[in-house]
Amino acid sequence: MTSIARWPLQQLPWTLLFLGSTLLFIGALYFQYAMDLEPCVKCVYQRAAVAAIAVAAVIGGLGRNYWVTRWLGLLGWAYASFQGLLVAYDHWDLQTSKNAFFAVCENQPNFPAWLPLHEWLPGFFGATGLCGDIDWDFLGMGMPGWMTFIFAGFFIVAVLVSLLHLFRGRP
């Protein structure tokens, strides 16, 4: 457990976190552009959470020698993972409800006015699909279900690493 507690002090774990979240983002773009699956608002929010995890990994990795940036990276990772988990679970619940046909979501993402990602990068964060559509599944579970488990894994690891680092990983 002590070695896990020291992960935030090492470059490799931050790099792996960045690469993992980047691969998820690339996968989302593959689904959108190669498979012609249009992302809905909840998909876009999940993309934003994945992008936030990548940004947290950069902050934590580049500043791993400074406690402030290291903790900004850890807390950003945990917060983005938790928010992604909430959105993915809500999306999964919406798609699997008995009245999924009547499930509606917003037409446009509701990003803060100071960060309108859907206006700045509409190819990445523009929402053109419907939340209730199930256009893809793997092993009987749609994309929101898989993303729920992925975000849960990100969140559990973030909390575990943060707690162990807090109590056992002091340099």
Image (tube, rainbow, N blue to C red):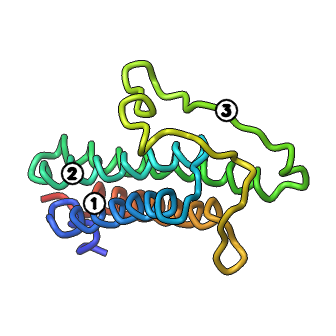
Amino acid carrying mark 2 in the image: Val
Q: Nearer the viewer, residue 64 or 52?
A: 52
User: SS of the residue at dot 3?
Assistant: loop
Which marked residue is nearer to the observer: mark 2 or mark 3? 3
To which residue does mark 2 refer? 58
Give the side of residue 4 with respect to residue 25, left or right: left
What distance separates the C-alpha of mark 1 from that of mark 2?
Answer: 7 Å
To which residue does mark 3 refer? 106
The tag earlier along the polypeptide, 1 or 2, is 1
CB-based contact (under 8 Å), mark 2 and mark 3: no
Q: Answer with the quarter of the image where residue 48 lies.
A: top left
Q: Nearer the viewer, residue 76 or 26?
A: 26
Position in image of residue 151 (x %, y %): 51, 59
Q: Nearer the viewer, residue 128 or 83?
A: 128
- Give the answer, above or below, for where 51 lies relative to 16: above
Q: Residue furthest left?
A: 65
Q: Residue furthest bottom?
A: 139
User: SS of the residue at dot 2?
Assistant: helix
